[in-house]
Image (spheres, helix red, strand yellow):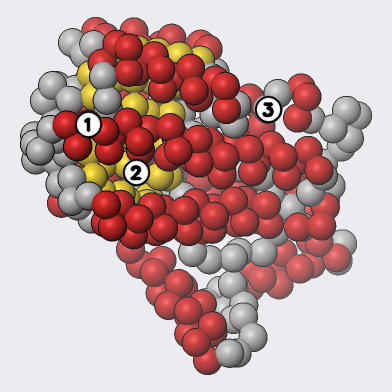
Amino acid sequence: MISNFAGKTAVITGAGSGFGLELSRLCAKAGMNVVLADVQADALAAADAEIRAAGAQTLAQQIDVSNADAMQALAEAVQAKFGEPHLVFNNAGVGAGGLIWEHSLKDWEWVVGINIMGVAHGVRLFTPMMLAAAQADPGYQGHIVNTASMAGLLNAPNMGVYNVSKHAVVSLSETLSQDLALVTDQIHASVLCPFFVPTGISKSHRNRPLEMRDAGAKPTKSQLIAQAMSDNAVSKGKVTAADVAQMVMDAVAANQFYIYSHPKAIGSVQVRLEDIMLGRNPTSAFAHKPELGEQLKAQLRGA
């Protein structure tokens, strides 16, 4: 576990807003060097200026985390400026909803590219650097945090491609933790599983590249409904991105693997796991609030 953050280096993807920006602020406050990566140039520039003004040394790079070459360039730039990082937050992510068969090929490629491959690139590039640092220095301590979601532990309807991507991040993170334990005691991993928290993820389509869009295609009814539900749930979230960022830093210091923004939501995870263990059909996601399920059903069926 990392007990002293001062003088160490943190790499944060999705650093221009939401959890990423709040993590950048906390890392700067703790006296760390901060590497900020984001796809949105204006948000990145503003974040970099703020973090530098707070007294941190920074490296800012505008990148699409799904791009392997861009992530390679980021890793090389980090190595050149600060050496091996101590904290890596594979945090960049996008959201998309709708009935699972209505996602286009480009929907799948965009969400999987960012949410899964973005994390995979961060793990495959930075973990070897961190292992090399650990081998060279018995005092080195490192930690990797991957941002998943409660959608990585549950399967809410009308959120198909997002659920799939976040389940993959949970699996990747659990495997990473187990694999690290085989080869080192100096580097650990965590997975962040937030519920509905006011961040920019419900508006992530604003940064969707043109080549990842379906020209002329209009959102389906289910996709419009999913967007409206996401906007409503996220906007009403009472746990802030700053609250969650502090939870993450505390978890790193305590070497805690699972990080939940809303621990009460774990009850639904328990029900799902019981379904699996008992071989029973999946319990309705709306079992605790059937009226919401009936409302969604009526909307989708046009009643």
Task: Work out which quarter of the rendered image holds the C terminus and state it.
Answer: bottom right
Residue 243 pos. (x, y %): 28, 42
Left or right? Give the position of 243 relative to 207: left
- Earlier-in-chain disc, 3 versus 2: 2
Q: Quadrant of residue 126?
A: top left
Q: Is residue 246 visible?
A: no
Could you say whether the residue bearing mark 1 is in a helix, strand or loop? helix
Q: Where is residue 204, by image quadrant?
A: top right
Q: Which residue is mark 3?
A: 208
Please tell me how crowded label 2 is: few (under 14), some (14-19), or many (20+) other residues with Cα within 10 Å: many
Q: Position of residue 85 (x, y in %)?
A: 27, 27
The three-letter code of the residue at mark 2 reads: Val
Residue under pointer 2: 145
Q: Nearer the viewer, residue 146 or 186?
A: 186
Is residue 171 toward the left or the right of residue 163 in the image? left
Residue under the image location 54 percent in, 58 percent down:
167
Q: CA distance from mark 3 to mark 2?
A: 24 Å
Q: Residue at x 35, y 55 (%)?
A: 179
Distance in Å between CA atoms under marks 2 and 1 = 18 Å
Q: Amino acid at mark 1?
A: Ala
Q: Position of residue 169 (x, y in %)?
A: 49, 51
Which residue is identified by label 1? 133
Vertical placement of 286 versus 192: above or below?
below
Badge 3 marks a residue whose secondary structure is loop
Q: Residue at x 35, y 67 (%)?
A: 264
Vertical position of residue 161 compared to residue 11: above or below:
below
Mark 2 or mark 1: name the one nearer the start of the chain: 1
* Residue type pointed to by label 3: Arg
Which residue is more in the foreground, 226 or 106? 106
